[in-house]
């Protein structure tokens, strides 16, 4: 494919990617792997921060391996990445369930990682900058879009104009493309707000760097998290669905401060901790609803596609999967010279085939937290039943296992199985 060229102040390119976060960078890198040129426009200049939980799950590792197997070896030896081996769920009654990110032990590298987004995103963008097939334009914010001659014309805040056959919109939770062109709106029942701060000297961080999700009785149906970071730091925060925040008149910052001061477990763990940056709040559009993610000449990816896990809040892996599938679909569209909604719809089908069973499971788990006694029972039963515990572990690793979730008997076993020692 030819490089983008400027004609009469219009930059023409087959593929215009809006946003250079994990979704946009992944799309560009997979296109470059096929020798396909793309232009990425990014409103910030890297390195730049992104408010996030900072966890890189096994899905992130899977996408990186599909891109280039050497990448995971690279981050495994990079001091700004911390290997993580699982997640611990703490029930309202303080019972807990440790779920490893993998049940197979033969892999050399950690199955997941944790890295500040300012470091991970910059690392990924450096890969983008190294590819001659990718043209990255930083500090370029798109403000206007319009359809013209079976293409999309995009105009930036500083007056640049782009003409493209395909827009891959990866411009985040507050995407103007998602709102104004795709016509998708955030809905309180499928939207979450999160608050994050960085700390040092938090007591009791997990020896295997498991991330922690605490479903505290004073903050249900939201949750409190602690994610270990390199150099002994921690990403600490809380999240709650927007409709529940409104219903309960929740102020996230006040709730966060109250947990640290008044919850006896957290008060002790943070007794010597020191906050090392400002508290920041952000929106999380949840993937708890299946949506139309494409149309004539466009595909939505990452937070712009509202793909965040409704139970854990994890979004990076889903964003990178969406970027990968968008690149695969863009290649097909170019080969067929067809950019209509009917062919773009294959992107939706492929992406949801990979992610929807996980998102649906997480949505059901999110609903479970509305009943603390039931969540307590699930955690207790999983800990006393080896088969059930392994089944839950497999749900986070093995896609084929998730197909069993369609069987109602699975939920009966999940809730009512007794100890099998």
Image (spheres, rainbow, N blue to C red):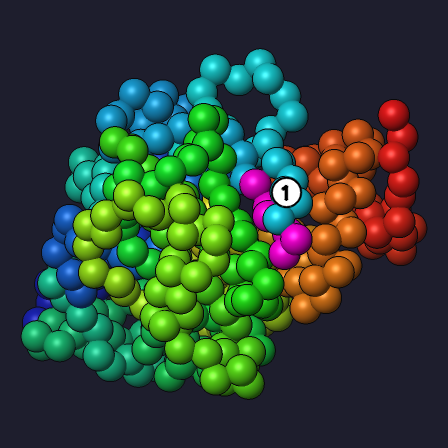
Q: Is 377 left, or right, of 259 in this rendering?
A: right
Residue range (magenta): 88-93
Quadrant for residue 269, please give it.
Answer: top left
Quadrant for residue 256, please give it.
Answer: bottom left
Q: Give the image location of residue 403, x and y in percent.
A: 78, 46
Query: In the displayed structure, would residue 145 be above or below residue 32?
Result: below
Residue at the image position 41 percent from the left and 24 percent from the top: 69
Q: Which residue is mark 1?
A: 96
Instruction: Check disc 1: other Cα within 10 Å, few if <14, some if 14-19, many if 20+.
Output: some
Towards the viewer: 84 or 378: 378
Query: In the displayed structure, would residue 71 be above or below residue 183?
Result: above
Residue at the image position 89 percent from the left and 49 percent from the top: 416
Residue at the image position 39 percent from the left and 58 percent from the top: 260
Q: Give the image location of residue 164, x and y in percent.
A: 29, 66
Towards the viewer: 193 or 197: 197
Towards the viewer: 268 or 308: 268
Which quarter of the rendering shows the C terminus? Answer: top right
Q: Is residue 148 magenta?
A: no
**Taking the image as drawn, is residue 171 in sight?**
yes
Q: Is residue 92 magenta?
A: yes
Number of marks: 1
Q: Is 156 left, or right, of 214 in this rendering?
A: left
């Amino acid at each position: 494919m030819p490089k983008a060229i400027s004609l009469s102040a219009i930059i023409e390119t087959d593929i215009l990617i809006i946003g250079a976060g994990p979704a946009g960078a992944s799309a560009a890198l997979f296109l470059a792997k096929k020798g396909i040129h793309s232009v990425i426009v990014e409103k910030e200049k890297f390195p730049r921060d992104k408010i996030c939980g900072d966890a890189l799950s096994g899905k992130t590792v899977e996408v990186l391996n599909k891109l280039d197997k050497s990448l995971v070896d690279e981050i495994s030896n990079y001091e700004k990445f911390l290997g993580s081996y699982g997640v611990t769920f703490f029930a309202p009654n303080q019972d807990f369930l440790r779920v490893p990110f993998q049940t197979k032990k033969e892999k050399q590298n950690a199955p997941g990682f944790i890295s500040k987004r300012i470091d991970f995103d910059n690392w990924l963008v450096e890969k983008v900058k190294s590819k001659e097939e990718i043209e990255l334009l930083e500090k370029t914010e798109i403000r206007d879009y319009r359809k013209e001659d079976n293409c999309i014309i995009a105009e930036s805040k500083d007056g640049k104009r782009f003409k493209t056959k395909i827009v891959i919109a990866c411009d985040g939770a507050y995407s103007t493309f998602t709102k104004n062109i795709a016509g998708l709106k955030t809905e309180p029942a499928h939207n979450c707000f999160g608050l994050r701060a960085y700390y040092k000297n938090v007591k009791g961080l997990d020896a295997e760097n498991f991330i922690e999700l605490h479903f505290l009785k004073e903050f249900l149906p939201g949750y409190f998290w602690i994610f270990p970071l390199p150099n002994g730091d921690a990403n600490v925060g809380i999240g709650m669905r927007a409709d529940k925040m409104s219903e309960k008149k929740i102020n996230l910052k006040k709730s966060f401060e109250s947990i640290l001061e008044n919850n006896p477990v957290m008060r002790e763990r943070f007794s010597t901790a020191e906050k090392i940056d400002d508290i920041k709040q952000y929106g999380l559009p949840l993937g708890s609803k299946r949506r139309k993610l494409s149309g004539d000449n466009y595909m939505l990816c990452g937070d712009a596609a509202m793909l965040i896990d409704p139970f854990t809040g994890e979004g990076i892996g889903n964003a990178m999967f969406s970027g990968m599938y968008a690149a695969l679909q863009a290649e097909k569209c170019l080969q067929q010279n067809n950019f209509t909604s009917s062919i773009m719809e294959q992107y939706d089908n492929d992406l949801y085939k990979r992610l929807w069973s996980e998102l649906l499971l997480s949505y059901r788990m999110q609903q479970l937290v509305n009943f603390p006694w039931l969540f307590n029972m699930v955690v207790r039963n999983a800990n006393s039943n080896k088969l059930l515990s392994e089944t839950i572990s497999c749900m986070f690793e093995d896609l084929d296992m998730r197909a069993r979730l369609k069987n109602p008997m699975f939920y009966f076993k999940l809730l009512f199985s007794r100890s099998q020692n």
